[in-house]
Image: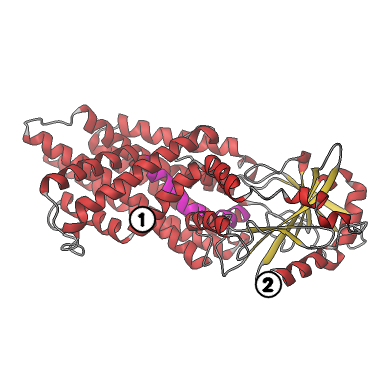
C-alpha cells in the first residue's frame, strides 16, 4: 500500500519529536533494565558471605524453628523458610530485622542456623542494594524522584514511546522493506546512522511494542488493579477471611501448622510442576482483636510465565496445606489474572528461563542504542537544515540537545558501572542512599562535562571515561570470581563489551582532534 508523501512527512515529524521527547528517558530505562534482567544473581554476587553453619535439612527445620522462636519470639510475627538458601538468604530460617520486610527491595534480615551442638546461631545481614537501585533506576526512567511521583511520569513517557513506534512504522516501513539490509557505511555518517537505526528498529519492533504496552500497565497499575478487583473479586473474599468464616472454619483445626516438608509435599500434590522456593509466614489481623497465621509460597514453573520477576505465588492454609489462593499460581489462574500475569511476565522476561533473559539483555542494550541513534539522527538533520539557511554554528536548541544526548548517555553508562564497582569493592557502602548519591554525582558530572567541554573534546573525553569505568568494573568482577564464576564472568564480559563499544568512537574522536590541531 502506497501512502501519500504529505502523510508520510507528517508521521516522520511526529516520530522525530516523540522520539526526542522520550529518547533520553528511554535510554536510561532500557540500559538499566537490561542489567536488571539479572538483578537476583547480581545481588547475590555483591552480598558478602554470612558465615553461618550449613543449613539444616528440611526435615530438621521444625527443630530450628522451635529453638529460634524460643530465643527470638518476635520472629513469629513474620518469618520465611528458605528451601534453597543462597548468598542473599543464607539460612534455612530468616526474618526481617525490626519487623520490616513488607516493602520493596532487599531488607536487613536475621538468618538462623543450628551449630553442631544444636544451639541456634544467628547473623544479621544487609544485602547489597546495588542491583535494586539499578532496577529502580529502570522503573523511574532515571528520575531522582519518589517512586509514586516518578511512575506516572514514566507512564506518560511510555505513551509518547508508543506514539513514536506507531508513527515510525507508518512513516518508514514502506521504504524500509526495500532497503532493510542495505547498511551503507560508505555513504556518509548520517546515512550509516539511519540505516543502523532502521535495522535495529525493524527487528526489535515486537519487543518494543511489548515494552511500551506493559510499561503503561505498570505506570497505572493502581487504577488497573482497582478495576481488576471490581471485575474478578465481586463474589470473592480474601483468603484470610475464607479461612475464618468458610466451611473449613467449622472443621477441627490442628493445634500447630504442618511442618515445612509436609507443606511442600501437599503443594506438590495439588500443583505438580510448581517448584517452591520460599515459605513466607505472617501473622495477620483477623476479626476484632484476633490474628491468624497466613502462608504465601513463592516459586517457579518453567512451563508458565510468572507474576513476579522470578516467582509465582500460592496462598496455602499452613494448618492443612490446602491451596486457598491460586490468583498468582502459574497454570492455576483464572482467565482475568492470567491476562494480567501475561503483561508482567512479558515485561520481566520471567518465562523461558536463562535464554529469554539473555535475549532481553541484548534487546535492552539494543533499545538503548536505538534511542541514542534516534537523537543523533535528529541532531544531524537539524544541522543540515541550519547550514542550508546559512547558519554556521548550532542553534541553541540543537546545541542543548546535542550536549544532553552526550552527557545523559555517557552519564548513565558510567554511573551504572561505578555503582557496581563501588558496591563490589565496599560492601559497607552499598546502601540505597549511598549508591544513589554515587550514581547521580557521576551522572551530573558527565552532563556538566558535556556542556562545559568543547564539541571537539567533549565526546572523546566522556566516551573514554565511560570505557575506563567499565574496564575497571570488568577488572573488579574478574577479581571476585570466588563469589560465583558464572556471574563474575558475565559481568566482566558485558563490561568489556560496553567499554569496547564506546572506546572505539572515543579514540577516533581523539585522532580526529589531533588531525584538526595539526591542520591549524
Residue 183 sits in quarter: bottom left
Identified at 83% across, 57% down, the residue is 248
Instruction: Specify whether residue 423 is in view.
Output: no
Residue 150, position as x, y percentages in the image: 49, 35
Q: Is residue 220 magenta?
A: no
Residue 25 sits in quarter: top left
Instruction: Specify whether residue 103 is in view.
Output: yes
Against 264, residue 256 (above or below) is above
**Range of residues picked out in magenta:** 25-44
Pick the residue in front: 409 or 442.
Answer: 409
> For this view, does 254 lie left or right of residue 466?
right
Q: Main secondary structure of the magenta part?
A: helix
Pick the residue in front: 481 or 166.
Answer: 166
> For this view, does 206 lie left or right of residue 346?
left
Disc nearer the start of the sequence (2/1): 2
Identified at 44% across, 59% down, the residue is 360
Against 455, residue 179 (above or below) is below
Q: Callout 2: few (<14), some (14-19), or many (20+) C-alpha neighbours within 10 Å? A: few
Against 434, residue 427 (above or below) is below
What residue does disc 1 label?
Answer: 366
Residue 242, position as x, y percentages in the image: 77, 51
Pick the residue in front: 152 or 141.
Answer: 152
Q: Quadrant of the N terminus?
A: bottom left
Pick the residue in front: 197 or 45.
Answer: 197
Query: SS for tag 2?
Result: loop
Q: Quadrant of the C terminus?
A: top left
Residue 390, position as x, y percentages in the image: 6, 31
Q: Give me the disc on residue 272.
A: 2
Identified at 40% across, 49% down, the residue is 212
Q: Give me the disc on residue 81.
A: none
Amino acid at each position: 500500500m502506497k501512502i501519500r508523501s504529505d502523510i508520510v512527512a507528517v508521521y516522520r515529524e511526529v516520530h522525530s519529536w516523540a522520539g526526542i521527547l522520550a529518547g533520553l528517558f528511554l535510554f536510561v530505562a532500557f540500559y538499566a533494565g537490561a542489567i536488571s534482567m539479572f538483578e537476583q544473581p547480581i545481588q547475590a554476587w555483591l552480598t558478602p558471605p554470612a558465615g553461618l553453619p550449613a543449613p539444616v535439612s528440611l526435615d530438621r527445620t521444625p527443630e530450628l524453628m522451635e529453638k529460634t522462636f524460643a530465643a527470638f519470639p518476635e520472629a513469629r510475627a513474620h518469618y520465611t523458610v528458605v528451601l534453597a538458601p543462597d548468598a542473599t538468604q543464607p539460612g534455612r530460617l530468616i526474618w526481617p530485622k525490626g519487623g520490616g520486610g513488607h516493602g520493596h527491595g532487599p531488607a536487613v534480615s536475621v538468618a538462623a542456623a543450628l551449630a553442631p551442638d544444636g544451639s541456634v546461631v544467628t547473623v544479621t545481614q544487609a544485602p547489597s542494594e546495588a542491583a535494586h537501585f539499578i532496577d529502580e533506576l529502570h522503573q523511574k526512567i532515571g528520575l531522582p524522584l519518589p517512586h509514586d511521583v516518578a511512575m506516572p511520569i514514566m507512564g506518560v513517557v511510555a505513551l509518547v514511546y508508543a506514539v513514536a513506534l506507531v508513527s515510525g512504522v507508518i512513516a518508514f516501513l514502506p521504504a524500509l522493506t526495500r532497503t532493510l539490509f542495505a547498511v551503507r557505511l560508505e555513504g556518509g555518517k548520517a546515512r550509516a546512522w539511519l540505516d543502523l537505526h532502521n535495522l535495529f528498529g525493524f527487528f526489535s519492533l515486537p519487543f518494543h511494542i511489548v515494552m511500551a504496552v506493559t510499561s503503561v500497565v505498570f505506570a497505572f497499575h493502581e487504577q488497573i488493579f482497582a478495576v481488576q478487583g471490581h471485575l474478578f473479586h465481586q463474589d470473592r473474599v480474601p483468603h484470610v477471611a475464607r479461612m475464618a468464616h468458610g466451611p473449613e472454619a467449622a472443621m477441627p483445626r490442628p493445634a500447630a501448622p504442618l511442618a515445612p516438608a509436609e507443606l511442600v509435599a501437599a503443594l506438590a500434590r495439588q500443583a505438580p510442576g510448581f517448584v517452591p522456593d520460599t515459605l513466607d509466614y505472617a501473622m495477620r489481623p483477623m476479626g476484632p482483636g484476633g490474628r491468624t497465621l497466613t502462608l504465601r509460597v513463592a516459586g517457579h514453573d518453567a512451563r508458565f510465565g510468572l507474576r513476579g520477576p522470578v516467582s509465582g505465588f500460592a496462598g496455602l492454609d499452613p494448618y492443612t496445606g490446602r491451596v486457598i489462593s491460586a490468583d498468582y499460581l502459574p497454570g492455576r489462574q483464572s482467565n482475568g489474572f492470567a491476562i494480567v500475569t501475561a503483561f508482567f511476565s512479558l515485561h520481566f522476561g520471567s518465562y523461558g528461563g536463562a535464554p529469554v533473559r539473555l535475549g532481553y539483555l541484548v534487546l535492552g542494550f539494543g533499545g538503548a542504542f536505538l534511542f541514542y541513534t534516534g537523537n543523533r539522527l535528529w541532531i544531524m538533520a537539524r544541522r543540515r537544515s541550519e547550514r542550508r539557511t546559512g547558519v554556521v554554528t548550532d542553534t541553541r536548541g540543537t546545541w542543548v540537545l546535542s550536549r544532553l544526548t552526550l552527557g545523559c548517555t555517557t552519564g548513565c553508562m558510567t554511573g551504572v558501572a561505578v555503582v557496581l564497582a563501588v558496591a563490589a569493592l565496599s560492601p559497607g557502602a552499598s546502601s540505597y542512599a549511598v549508591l544513589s548519591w554515587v550514581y547521580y554525582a557521576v551522572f551530573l558530572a558527565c552532563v556538566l562535562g558535556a556542556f562545559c567541554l568543547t564539541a571537539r573534546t567533549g565526546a572523546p573525553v566522556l566516551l573514554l571515561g565511560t570505557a575506563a569505568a567499565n574496564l575497571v568494573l570488568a577488572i573488579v568482577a574478574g577479581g571476585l570470581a570466588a563469589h560465583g564464576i558464572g556471574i563474575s564472568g558475565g559481568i566482566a564480559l558485558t563490561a568489556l563489551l560496553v567499554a569496547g563499544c564506546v572506546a572505539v568512537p572515543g579514540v577516533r574522536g581523539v585522532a580526529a582532534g589531533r588531525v584538526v590541531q595539526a591542520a591549524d
